[in-house]
Amino acid sequence: MVGREKELTIHFVPGSCQLVEEDVNVPSRRALITGATGLLGRAVYKEFEQNNWHAVGCGYSRARPRFEQVNLLDTHAVHDIIQDFQPHVIVHCAAERRPDVVENQPDAASQLNVDASGNLAKEAAGIGAFLIYISSDYVFDGTNPPYTEEDAPNPLNLYGKTKLEGERAVLENNVGAAILRIPVLYGEVEKLEESAVTIMFDKVQFSNKSANMDHWQQRFPTNVKDVASVCRQLAEKRMLDPTIKGTFHWSGNEQMTKYEMACAIADAFNLPNSHLRPITDSPVLGAPRPRNAQLDCSKLETLGIGQRTPFRVGIKESLWPFLIDKRWRQTVFH
């Protein structure tokens, strides 16, 4: 999988069809992306692929035909793909990221978020690959923001605990690995439910029905394209400097509650927002959430690493395919 490879191309000529074997250039830098079928994984795969890396993505239930199908709980399968591909960098995006699902399925979530991460770190160390483990702002309790990489974690829910345990499993098995903590994500979703941000769009659009929106938890919505760019920049800096390792934070810098995000979405699409109702009480249902787990990103910024898309720009790009009023789409985008 290194250097030049043979690729079969179909050549159509009037009256005939030929299968021709041609040489194709393959970039020498290799990146393996886990969870490549997910919202973040797709963006990370695309970022590396479009910036002169030979990227291979792996997934499980949705992997074929674009990506390799690998069960990350199968240690032999993980070993085989890493030994076969010999990546320089592994970006570990695969995780159970839904806090309420983690609470209801703790064993399965722990296997993926902790056990599989530790094993991946061990395999990466075995070939000298740089592992970037994607973690979460939910490792903090949200009582004393902003949080630096040196601040003591104190997760409030099981999801945050599994991500923190995953961090520790990674660093125990691979001292040269990097932890990248990030907040709530949005981006070019395949369906609105893929992101806790984009899922609000239907409530925004259906203005004939009032909708209660959380106005208690402070969030920092972050575009997956920006996280993907940070991962690539971090990987490329590490290729030049082996001291690049340890824990890092990246986040958007616009502080918003879900109510404020919903209003910003309405504003971006010239939709009414009077039907949206701010709820300032702390949520009583579901896994407990930190009030404000703002991440201090100055460590990466000092390294010259970063990218931020303004929320209104990114959310319009992400959501316009799901806009119900086609007339508005035609006037704005044509």
Image: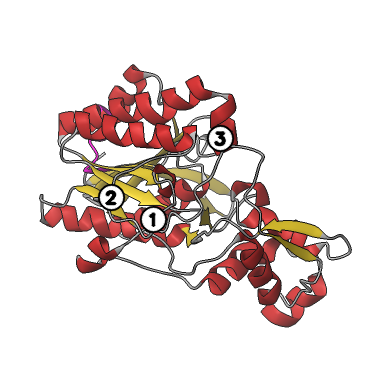
Label 2: how many Cα within 10 Å (few below 14, some 14–19, many 20+):
few
Q: How far apart are the alpha carbons under marks 2 and 1?
A: 10 Å
**81 is higher (above) or lower (below) than 207:** above
Q: Residue at x 63, y 56 (%)?
A: 198
Quadrant of the rendered structure where residue 187 is? Answer: bottom right
Give the amino acid at mark 3. Answer: Arg
Which label number is shown at residue 144?
1
Horizontal side of residue 145 vs 265, given as left or right: left
User: Viewer-proximal residue, 55 or 198?
Assistant: 198
Q: Position of residue 130 (x, y in %)?
A: 21, 43
Quadrant of the rendered structure where residue 81 is? Answer: top left
Q: Residue at x 28, y 29 (%)?
A: 169
User: Viewer-proximal residue, 164 or 328?
Assistant: 164
Is 86 colored magenta in this rendering? Answer: yes
Q: Position of residue 208 (x, y in %)?
A: 89, 64
Quarter the C terminus occupies: bottom right
Disc 2 or 1, which lies upstream in sequence?
Answer: 1
Give the amino acid at mark 1. Answer: Asn
Q: Nearer the viewer's eye, disc 2 or disc 1?
A: 1
Q: Nearer the viewer's eye, disc 3 or disc 1?
A: 1
Q: Which residues are magenta?
A: 83-90
Contact check, label 3 and label 2, Cβ < 8 Å: no
**73 is higher (above) or lower (below) than 257:** above
User: Viewer-proximal residue, 213 or 193?
Assistant: 213
Q: Nearer the viewer's eye, disc 3 or disc 2?
A: 2
Contact check, label 2 and label 1, Cβ < 8 Å: yes
Q: Residue at x 20, y 39 (%)?
A: 129
Label 3: how many Cα within 10 Å (few below 14, some 14–19, many 20+):
some
